[in-house]
Image (cartoon, coloured by chain):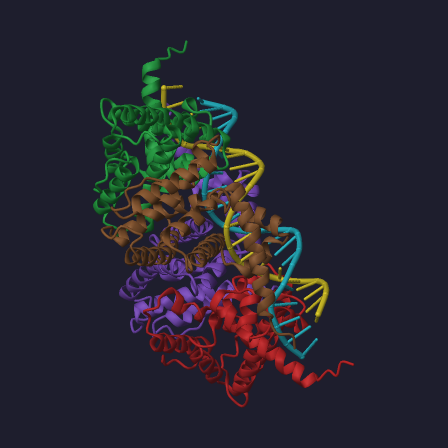
Chain colours: A red, B purple, C brown, D green, E cyan, F yellow
Amino acid sequence: MRKLDPVKHEEKRREILDAAERCFVRDGLKGASISSICAEARISPGHLYHYFTSKEAIVGAMIEARLEEAAARFAKRAEGADVLSTLFGEMKVTRSGHPALLLEALAEANRSPPMAKALQDHTKGVHSLLADLLEKGQAAGTIDPTLDRHVTASLLISIIDGSKTLYLRDPKLDVQEATRALQTMLVRYLAPASDTQKV
Amino acid sequence: MRKLDPVKHEEKRREILDAAERCFVRDGLKGASISSICAEARISPGHLYHYFTSKEAIVGAMIEARLEEAAARFAKRAEGADVLSTLFGEMKVTRSGHPALLLEALAEANRSPPMAKALQDHTKGVHSLLADLLEKGQAAGTIDPTLDRHVTASLLISIIDGSKTLYLRDPKLDVQEATRALQTMLVRYLAPASDTQKV
Amino acid sequence: MRKLDPVKHEEKRREILDAAERCFVRDGLKGASISSICAEARISPGHLYHYFTSKEAIVGAMIEARLEEAAARFAKRAEGADVLSTLFGEMKVTRSGHPALLLEALAEANRSPPMAKALQDHTKGVHSLLADLLEKGQAAGTIDPTLDRHVTASLLISIIDGSKTLYLRDPKLDVQEATRALQTMLVRYLAPASDTQKV
Amino acid sequence: MRKLDPVKHEEKRREILDAAERCFVRDGLKGASISSICAEARISPGHLYHYFTSKEAIVGAMIEARLEEAAARFAKRAEGADVLSTLFGEMKVTRSGHPALLLEALAEANRSPPMAKALQDHTKGVHSLLADLLEKGQAAGTIDPTLDRHVTASLLISIIDGSKTLYLRDPKLDVQEATRALQTMLVRYLAPASDTQKV
DNA sequence: GATGAATGAGATTTCATTCAT
DNA sequence: TATGAATGAAATCTCATTCAT
């Protein structure tokens, strides 16, 4: 009797996730309520439960989508580019892309094993992309060959994470200047020893 | 004839804050409930309100205490030391000191102006300490004199923040190795141009 | 496909208000609790908040309804009648109609501006009705033309208010006798000077 | 061991009652809390319970004191005066003397038998004073001898009660004018039939 | 698919009262 | 006498979730 249209279903799911995201950004993962999400998505609470089994599921799906999107963006940026320009590209995003959500996810990962797993799974993808880029750079002689690719990749990710707090800790900071400084640091770190010149 | 004993009062306050902190680490800033805090502190809910006017006040006092403590620790470490060894010292703390709380505070600062203010105020202290250390290093010739002290200080703080996520994103990461890599990066970044040798 | 049914909604609202009124009469405006109202209305506390945003809103709506009802009853009684018979009619209600609620409202109006406003707004309606009746009586020669209609109307309302305390101050008082005395007083007060005969 | 000084005790009790009264006027009988009373009286909650066994006892004692005071004032005013001037005197008090408390007491008397009893006991005193004054007036020929003294006394009390609502129902009312109108009404009501002239 | 009524547990906070000192 | 620590019940209100239609 139910003629279920999987396409429309998926569409609606995404609509709800979008609405949920706006609520989560505004009110926090715990602070946002199912009913606020329903209001934002203009559906009834009963209906929402046709698409998601619980609030936790919404949070999970939403974070998952965000992480996936970020990974995809990163992968696209990495295509045919070198490590440095990929990283530089990523850093311009710093103030957009709702760092709030990433911080929420990181805080939540401390307590929620599913959240931690989602975070770690996604991290793996970005990690191996970076490690590959580093390897290519080392082969091409543009990256210091003495650096361990895996540790360095992890480090680079953590630096991107850290860059999300710059604005929170000092809203008056000149973002462009800070970005440039970050780039300088990365260049100095990753360049082979022969590259004596400082940027 | 008995007058209120401010020492005991302060003691009890700290006891409650300690209990609260354990709850906040375990359940999150929003996830921890007043009654769980009361249970942890072994007092009645009514009594808690002799010491704090609201849950928000508890969160605020607790974060403030943590930030102050961190700043004090940092200041002590900086006494008579140079930038690099101060930073290296700070990084060993990485896995202790409840990074969970810092991440919670950062996430919360996105929405709560008082939290943002507390974070920014504390940041200023650490920032100027770092800037001073950088200046001294530049005067002594151990730090690249072309670096802007203020931007660099901000950047260093954000790198410390980012280091808090290393373990969350990859629990299998070798922390010692990662710490060494971080140190390498800092040395390469901060060293004057003449110091050609890589560590 | 089911849309919200405003009729049923309104019905339920009124049911809750009726239950609330019973509680308020029994326990007082402050003494009645949300949970007692829920018990009386046989709904859950959560559900009550689908219909009212706060306890204050319930109190307000309930008093408003009462005042409106009283005003409507008064207006109906005044239709085609003269002042005296209207007032006499109103006085027979004395012991019914829950004078308790009016006294609560009056006491509350001392502190609650919204309550004061509701009371004053409703008073205006009754006041102008009375003033009109007085004017007609003066034109017809049955009411002393030297009386100021507005002050007199206010006075008459306060006398009705005062009549609500008769039973409270002396439960053994013969209500019929008291009502007759009240009527006598009103006749003597309002009658034109030429009407020398006392009732 | 306890050398209890009954005079000081009584003094303190009265101080507390005065403080309590201010709180009750400000916040209502239910709205005022023990701790607000303690703050107002500048004593500790533990200490308060040396003087009163419960909040109810404070309310009771306070209302009792008020009623007694009102009765005493009334009695003093009645000394050697006639009904009308006594009533006129009483009416000038209208806006002072915290009508709030009387209205609270009346509302409370609907539910609290002790409060009802206190009210009725006090009423009896005023009632018989008024009845006496009326009797004297009738003997002297200044009061209509056909009026029942007891019913009339009750009626007069209720009119004084009602006058307490004048200002609440219409804050813009000219109090002097209203008082004059009230006096007119009383004169017309109480004067013997022969006194044809209207005031 | 879609609504909104309905639930009941639980959150924060207040308050009268008692207790130890 | 006097303090303020301490209690625990209860009050208001929120929220994730389920159900009937």
Compared across the picture, whether C40 is left or right of A152 comes to right
In percent of width and height, residue D117 lies at: 46, 28
x then y, percent, for residue C70: 45, 54
Left or right: C157 as drawn, with respect to D112: left
Query: Do we see residue D186 in this rendering?
Result: yes
Position of A158 with respect to E2 (left or right) is left
Judge left or right: residue A172 versus residue B16. left
How many discs mark residues in the rendered view? Answer: 0
Residue positioned most to the bottom: A80
Report the front residue among B81 and D106.
D106
Q: Position of residue D32 (x, y in %)?
A: 40, 39
Residue furthest top in the image: D1
Q: Is residue B80 above or below residue A18?
A: above
- Looking at the picture, tell me which residue is in the foreground, C6 or A140: C6
Quarter of the image with the C terminus of chain B in it: bottom left
Report which quarter residue D105 is drawn in.
Answer: top left
Please provide percent x and percent y for residue B8: 42, 33
Q: Is residue A158 visible?
A: no
Answer with the quarter of the image where residue D90 lies.
top left
The N terminus of chain B sits in image quarter: top left
Closer to the camera in the image, D115 or B20? D115
Q: Nearer the viewer, residue D143 or D1?
A: D143
Q: Is residue A73 depicted above or below A40 in this figure?
A: below
Residue in the image at 41% along x and 41% along y: C163
Residue drawn at 39 percent across, 34 percent down: B7
